[in-house]
């Protein structure tokens, strides 16, 4: 399935839904790479690069993918990929990190000059320790295409299983150690914030609506450098057992953490109900995600 190191549950008193399906790829260096395979052929490539002043993420996709950008729930750009990759540039400024997310296709950025659309979050390191920075969602059809061989990349994970094809990929950036805390059921992260990450899909960011992520247990791929990690969730959602087209969806994420904080939350049994939509007007006597910081 992959050549990572499986999360060790030995000695854990409690387990999370990530405890048995998390795999670590720690480069112990400033650059880490991995490729996604289908039937042994590379269809996606990921690179996490740590810089003196921040971090960069590169995701290479095959030609013919529909690259869709969203802002505030609306589609702002839709192009077909050609020799394309998605890039996230994160620049650290004191305790904050600003940046930009954009696609480069055939040497062009369709949103060049439109900074308000491609702005990445102005987040603090403590924010991405509570909820990782969302980068993109990739939806794969039966005809995935393939990328260049990437023979220099030793790390891999296979998407085609004997019983299913993991056709949905969601990618996040976090401070190193976040995934291990989730897989270890650590109390260092509020259970409300941990639940939000584990059980909801990226529809939260490109459609503005929280949607539960029901489906097969994912492969949780954790690609690590010295200070950061790229979290790749490879799954198959019950409501999306197949896609007609290959799509990469990315989005304006500047205020993602603040918007999550505005959502109402109700504790229920051993879990939570989280408001599907952001509430701009907060009222007393109600709990919000910000109360769990």
Image (spheres, rainbow, N blue to C red):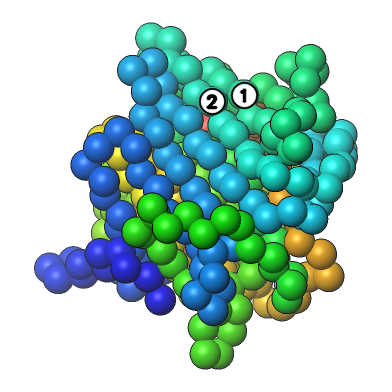
Disc 1 crowd, CA 10 A, few/some/many (<14, 14-19, 20+): many
Q: Nearer the viewer, residue 8 or 227?
A: 227
The quarter of the picture where residue 170 lies is bottom right
In screen coordinates, is 210 left or right of 198? right
Q: Which residue is mark 2?
A: 89
Secondary element under disc 1, as helix, strand or loop, is strand
- For the N terminus, the image quarter is bottom left
> Which residue is at the far top?
94
Q: Nearer the viewer, residue 211 or 5?
A: 5
> Which residue is at the far bottom?
163
Q: Nearer the viewer, residue 26 or 198?
A: 26
Looking at the picture, does residue 284 appear above or below residue 186? above
Question: Which residue is at a point 74% across and 17% down the rendered structure image?
Answer: 115
Q: Position of residue 258 (x, y in %)?
A: 60, 27
Separation of disc 1 and disc 2 at Cα?
5 Å
Question: Which residue is at a point 33% across and 73% down the rendered structure image?
Answer: 20
Residue 265 seen from this side? no
- For the C terminus, the image quarter is top left
Question: Which residue is at a point 54% across and 64% down the rendered structure image?
Answer: 42
Q: Which residue is mark 1?
A: 100
Looking at the picture, does residue 155 appear above or below residue 136? below
Disc 2 crowd, CA 10 A, few/some/many (<14, 14-19, 20+): some
Asked if the residues shown at circle 1 and circle 2 are in contact, with their CB atoms under 8 angstroms apart, the answer is: yes
């Amino acid at each position: 399935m992959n050549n990572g190191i499986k999360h060790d549950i030995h000695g854990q008193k409690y387990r999370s839904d990530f405890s048995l399906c998390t795999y670590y790829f720690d480069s112990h260096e400033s650059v880490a790479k991995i490729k996604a395979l289908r039937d042994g052929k590379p269809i996606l490539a990921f690179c996490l690069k740590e810089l003196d002043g921040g971090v960069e993420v590169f995701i290479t996709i095959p030609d013919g993918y529909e690259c869709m950008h969203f802002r505030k729930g609306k589609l702002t750009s839709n192009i077909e990929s050609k020799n394309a990759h998605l890039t996230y540039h994160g620049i650290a400024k004191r305790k904050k990190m600003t940046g930009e997310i954009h696609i480069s296709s055939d040497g062009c950025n369709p949103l060049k000059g439109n900074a308000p659309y491609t702005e990445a979050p102005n987040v603090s390191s403590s924010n991405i320790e509570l909820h990782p920075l969302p980068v993109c969602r990739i939806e794969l059809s039966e005809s995935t295409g393939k990328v260049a061989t990437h023979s220099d990349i030793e790390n891999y994970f296979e998407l085609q299983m004997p019983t299913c094809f993991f056709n949905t990929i969601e990618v996040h950036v976090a401070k190193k150690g976040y995934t291990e805390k989730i897989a270890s059921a650590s109390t260092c992260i509020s259970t409300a914030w941990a639940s939000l990450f584990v059980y909801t899909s990226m529809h939260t960011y490109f459609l503005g609506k929280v949607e539960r992520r029901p489906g097969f247990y994912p492969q949780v791929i954790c690609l690590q450098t010295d200070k950061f990690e790229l979290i790749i969730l490879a799954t198959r959602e019950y409501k999306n057992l197949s896609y007609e087209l290959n799509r990469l969806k990315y989005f304006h994420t500047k205020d993602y953490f603040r918007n999550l904080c505005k959502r109402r939350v109700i504790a229920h049994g051993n879990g939570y109900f989280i408001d599907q939509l952001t509430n701009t007007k907060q009222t007393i006597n109600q709990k919000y995600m910000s109360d769990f910081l």
